[in-house]
Amino acid sequence: EIVLTQSPATLSLSPGEGVTLSCRASQSVSSYLGWYQQKPGQAPRLLIYDASKRATGIPARISGSGSGTDFTLTIGSLEPEDFALYYCQQRSNWPYTFGQGTKLEIK
Amino acid sequence: EVQLVESGGGLVQPGGSLRLSCAGSGFSFSSYWIQWVRQAPGKGLMWVSRTNNDGSSTNYADSVKGRFTISRDNARNTLYMQMNSLRAEDTAVYYCASGPVVGAPEYWGQGTQVSVSS
């Protein structure tokens, strides 16, 4: 099973700031890495798939990059609605796995 | 409007059974892989099971293999999961999820709560 490790666990930032979240895989997942946002009481929302492709309706200020074992999610300028939990997920090998999450909180 | 609506959750004793359902609408249900993903209270996400567009191929997480069975009825646009021999550690919100990219579901339901306790 591929283990995904996200860092940091928590980030405290202010609206308007930029942020980069990291995800490292225990073995190569090629480009089959996605990012999800989850807010309390809600289902996850797909933001990015295949490392850098935006899902439907995702704004351009949200971007992803990476390949192999190291990936990043970048939010260019934080809006109030961006403060949430973020998960990375690989679809390279079954079982698909998620990272443990990074919580983005308002400073 | 794309919708996935789960039902069938509830409180069950250890060793008991439940059948979850997920009704899809607003998209080409029969064209896409579909899966169950769960989230234990205060915990992260775990992929439970998936099936291909016609139900001929299925995969399970090791922790549920032999106890859970995923199936779909494309005539009814509905996904199912039969859960037997339930354990306390199966307590979670269960989401169904689907979409055009295999393994990167864009459509998610609101989830159904399964609680296993005596």
Image: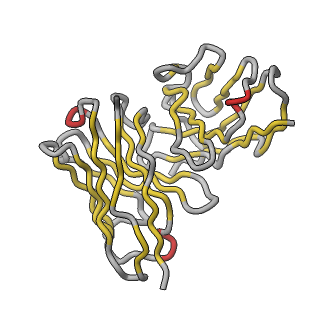
User: Residue A3, how many percent across, how many down?
Assistant: 59, 48
- Image position of B57 (left or right of A72): left
Q: Residue farthest to the bottom?
A: B118
Assign the C terminus of chain A to one quadrant of the image.
Answer: top right
Q: Give the camera-side residue of A65 and B76.
A: B76
- Image position of B76 (left or right of A96): left
- Image position of B57 (left or right of A83): left
| As drawn, B51 above or below A91 | below
- Image position of B10 (left or right of A10): left
Here the colouring is secondary structure
Q: Where, by quadrant of the figure, is residue B64 drawn?
A: bottom left
User: Residue B3, how many percent across, how many down?
Assistant: 35, 37
Q: Give the camera-side residue of B45 and A42.
A: A42
Q: Residue farthest to the front?
A: B1
Q: Residue at x 57, y 41 (%)?
A: A27
User: Residue A79, how many percent across, how many down?
Assistant: 72, 24
Q: Residue at x 59, y 53 (%)?
A: B44
Q: Residue farthest to the right?
A: A107
User: Residue B5, how many percent across, how many down?
Assistant: 35, 47
**Number of numbered discs visible in the structure rendering:** 0
Q: Residue farthest to the left?
A: B75
| As drawn, A16 above or below B18 | above
Q: Residue at x 26, y 56 (%)?
A: B80
Q: Where, by quadrant of the figure, is residue A11 drawn?
A: top right
Q: Residue at x 59, y 17 (%)?
A: A59
Q: Give the camera-side residue of B107 and B59.
A: B107
